[in-house]
Image (spheres, rainbow, N blue to C red):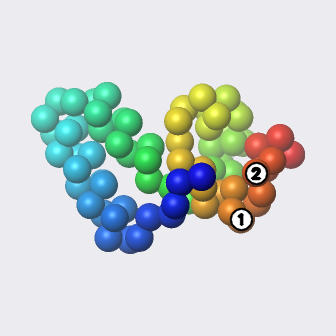
Amino acid sequence: MPQTMTLDERFDTINKAFTLLNAGDREGYSCLIRTIPMPTYLAKVAKETMGVDFLTKGGWNLTEVEAEFGRDWLNK
């Protein structure tokens, strides 16, 4: 399981991702932005509105969500 990121690491990753996006690399941006742990409130909304497949097949970092709700939260 990946470790959580510090706030500084999150900001650094976001800056790198937007640098890629501004350079026209949408795929690089998307891959990098998904390494940032998704906040629990966003994961809950995404699960309800976009479905479990969006989260499981999308490559999102769900470490914080799993830490708070358990590993089986998507199946509940």
Q: Residue at x 77, y 57 (%)?
A: 70
Q: Secondary structure at mark 1?
A: helix
Front one among 34 and 3: 3
Q: Residue at x 76, y 43 (%)?
A: 74
Residue 7 is situated, as x and y percent measured from the top left of the image, at 38, 71
Q: Which disc is residue 71 wearing?
A: 2
Q: Relative to residue 29, is residue 4 depicted above or below?
A: below
Residue 22 is situated, as x and y percent measured from the top left of the image, at 16, 39
Residue 63 is situated, as x and y percent measured from the top left of the image, at 60, 55
Is 8 left, or right, of 70 in this rendering? left
Is 50 left, or right, of 18 in this rendering? right
Q: Residue furthest left?
A: 23
Cβ atoms at labels 1 and 2 below 8 Å apart: no
Label 1: which residue? 68
Q: Which disc is residue 17 wearing?
A: none
Q: Relative to residue 67, is residue 54 depicted above or below?
A: above
| Residue 38 appears in the rendering | no
